[in-house]
Amino acid sequence: MYRQPGCHYCLTWDRVVGPVYPKSDLGKQVPIRMVDLKQLDQPRVELARLVIYTPTFVLIDDSREVGRIEGYPGEDFFWARLEKLVRSLPVR
């Protein structure tokens, strides 16, 4: 999750989804890492394009972006989009 200080939508995600995310099946399957958009020492991953908006949720597989969710317009949207992204992961 790319975020930045003062991001209202990030704080809303923290309050609504954050507490249940690690307990959910999807959260266990794809653990979340918080990344400050303004930090210089960001994780070394191959992004499809720059992250501009926060929050942006980037699904990574083998250090490469598989897909992303830009923004947070609500809990239902987030879970549905995340489920769709996780289904796009290669089967191993």
Image (cartoon, rainbow, N blue to C red):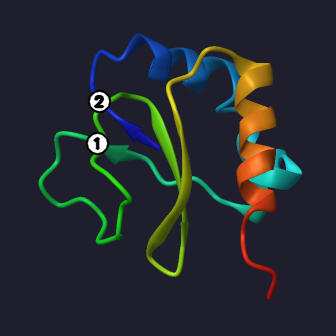
Q: Which mark is residue 77?
A: none
Q: Which mark is residue 36?
A: 1
Quarter assignment of residue 55: top left
Question: Residue pushed farthest right?
Answer: 25
The crowd level at tag 1 (other Cα within 10 Å; few <14, some 14-19, many 20+) is: some
In the shown orientation, is residue 76 left or right of residue 38? right
Q: Which residue is mark 2?
A: 4
Residue 70, given in percent of the width and then of the height, sits at: 49, 32
Residue appearing at x 32%, y 52% in the figure:
49
Task: Give me the C-alpha separation between circle 2 and circle 1.
Answer: 5 Å
The crowd level at tag 2 (other Cα within 10 Å; few <14, some 14-19, many 20+) is: some
Q: Is residue 56 above or below residue 49?
A: above
Question: Residue pushed farthest top?
Answer: 8
Residues at marks 2 and 1 touching, judged by CB atoms closer than 8 Å? yes
Quarter assignment of residue 67: bottom right
Identify residue type, mark 2.
Gln
Identify residue type, mark 1.
Asp
Residue 59, given in percent of the width and then of the height, sits at: 57, 57
Residue 74, given in percent of the width and then of the height, sits at: 68, 15
Residue appearing at x 72%, y 69% in the figure:
89
